[in-house]
Amino acid sequence: MTSVIEKATAPASSPAYTVSELLAVVSCRYLQGKRRVFAGIGLPTLAVALAQKSTSPDIEQVYESGVCGAHPPKLPETIADASLATGAETILTMPVLFGYVLQGGWIDVGFLGAAQIDRFGSLNTSVIGPWDAPTVRLPGSGGAIEVMANSQEVFVVMRRHNTTSFVRELDFCTSPSPIAARRADPKVPTRGAGVTTVISELGVFTSDAEGELCLASIHEGVTVEQVREQTGWPVKVLDSVTVTPPPTEEELRLLRDDIDPGRVYLR
């Protein structure tokens, strides 16, 4: 699995786009061909909005608040933003959303963020540091553990890529990957593949047949060695690792002018 291009380097440049714009564009590209996406607020919402206006006009976004098939007139700032109801295809109660739509296997992609991720795609959104005296206390699971357990696959977008976010061992396992869940208890029912794609500020990881996250793409100006240095586990690098194509002018125009002109999520 280890690539022969250990010293491969993307072309050095001063890109005319921000990390947020890059992550939204790359995430959008990986959503092409997907139908129902259970997306969190923030960069996942931005990526789905871009997909709806470009590669995937029929993509259906589902929010934790029960909104399905959202077509908001403006970028929502929370899952309870009133604009989500405008033009939505349906609004369900949360028990119906989780008990029927999510647990029923109707979600193609769960799209999440996290503070920490390990090599098999388990996530920490609870605490950084020890549980009884954390250095940072985070929001917790919300619906993420259900999304992890029941989506056909999960995408994760990580703004920061360093050894405190891509870790050998999580400070707390909020959302175990299906592999970790089965390892803890073989009788645990798991529906989907878990985390199959991770988009970070340095590159893109995809999962192999064993569920381990492997480096598939590096962004402009990034080296494979940089990714290794900033990742808390020994990184497997695909033989076919590529350099991420930069955002196009049209993708950036859609993000800046049509989708998020107020810079709610773009920074």
Image: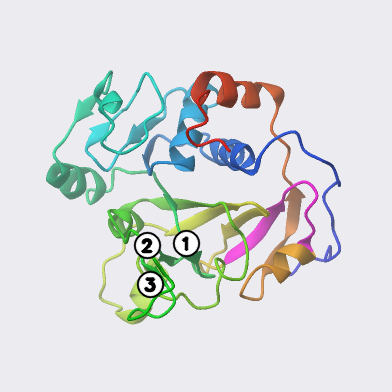
Could you give the CA–CA distance between mark 2 and mark 3, rounded to whole angstroms?
A: 12 Å
Q: Earlier in the sequence, mark 1 or mark 3?
A: 1
Image location of residue 251, percent across then percent down: 63, 26
Front residue (pair 254, 212): 254
Q: Residue flagged by tag 2: what amino acid is it?
A: Leu
Indicate yes or no whether the magenta region holds residue 214: yes
Disc 1 to disc 3: CB gap under 8 Å: no
Could you give the CA–CA distance between mark 1 and mark 3, rounded to whole angstroms?
A: 11 Å
**Image mark for residue 115:** 1
Badge 3 is on which residue?
Answer: 173
Q: Residue flagged by tag 1: what amino acid is it?
A: Ala
Disc 1 to disc 2: CB gap under 8 Å: yes
Classify 8 as above or below 10.
below
Image location of residue 244, percent across then percent down: 72, 44
Question: Which quadrant is home to the C terminus?
Answer: top right
Front residue (pair 247, 154): 247
Q: In this view of the protein, can residue 52 be seen by the observer?
A: yes
Would you identify the image quadrant in which residue 227 lies? bottom right
Badge 2 is on which residue?
Answer: 138
Q: Which residues are magenta?
A: 213-224
SS type, badge 1: loop
Q: In this view of the protein, can residue 1 be seen by the observer?
A: no
